Amino acid sequence: MIRIIVLLLIISLTGCSLFRQEQPEVRIRVVPVPMTVYQPEPVEPVRLENIQWHVITENNLEEKMAEIKKQLGTGFVVFAMTPQSYENLSYNVQELRRYIREQASIILYYEGVTEPNEMPLEPEPE
């Protein structure tokens, strides 16, 4: 009885390795797959309206009031800013221009990277 248990134990430990068949060699090939990336249409360019600036001082206040009343056809309304506010506005516009230029260069980079290659890749020899 012990011999049968030992025999079964040996067979179970060796498993199917006694009947081992030769496995075929596995070959891995890496083949580039062309990828199509959606390129959105370019956005419409910005169209800005003209802005008319009036510099109003103590010396020309009455003259500018009359000119603006004539343009508006109603009362006198002025939106004013201090010289420091004007400098801040100018700085903000420059920051926007810088940001837009940087974003445009990033977009151009990714458009170039995602365009399909002109030259096909050579397949690996078999």
Image: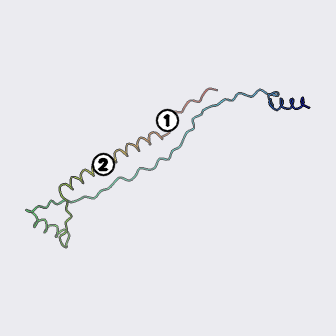
Name the kind of residue labelled 2 in the image. Arg
Q: Quadrant of the C terminus?
A: top right
Q: Is label 1 or label 2 in front?
A: 2
- Name the disc covering residue 118, or none: 1
Q: Residue furthest bottom?
A: 74
Q: Could you tell me which secondary element the residue under label 2 belongs to?
A: helix
Which sits earlier in the primary sequence, circle 1 or circle 2?
2
Along the line of sight, the residue nearer the viewer: 109 or 83: 83
Mark 2 — residue?
A: 97
> Is 58 displayed left or right of 6 in the figure?
left
The answer to which image quadrant residue 108 occupies is top left
Along the line of sight, the residue nearer the viewer: 42 or 75: 75
Q: Residue furthest front?
A: 2
Q: Which residue corresponds to the image point at 27% horizontal and 51% vertical from the top-left?
A: 93
Along the line of sight, the residue nearer the viewer: 6 or 115: 6
Q: Could you tell me which secondary element the residue under label 1 belongs to?
A: loop
> Is 124 displayed left or right of 56 in the figure?
right
Q: Which residue corresponds to the image point at 33% horizontal and 47% vertical from the top-left?
A: 99
Name the kind of residue labelled 1 in the image. Glu
**Other-residue count near label 2 (Cα within 10 Å), few / some / many at <14 / 14–19 / ≥20:** few
Along the line of sight, the residue nearer the viewer: 125 or 120: 125
| 28, above or below 93, in the image | above
Give how far apart the Cα atoms at labels 1 and 2 are.
34 Å
> Is 31 displayed left or right of 72 in the figure?
right
Q: Which residue corresponds to the image point at 19% horizontal and 62% vertical from the top-left?
A: 80
Q: Quadrant of the N terminus?
A: top right
Q: Position of residue 118 (x, y in %)?
A: 49, 35
| 74, above or below 43, in the image | below
Q: Position of residue 87 (x, y in %)?
A: 21, 52
**Other-residue count near label 1 (Cα within 10 Å), few / some / many at <14 / 14–19 / ≥20:** few
Q: Residue furthest left?
A: 59
Q: Which residue corresponds to the image point at 53% horizontal and 43% vertical from the top-left?
A: 36
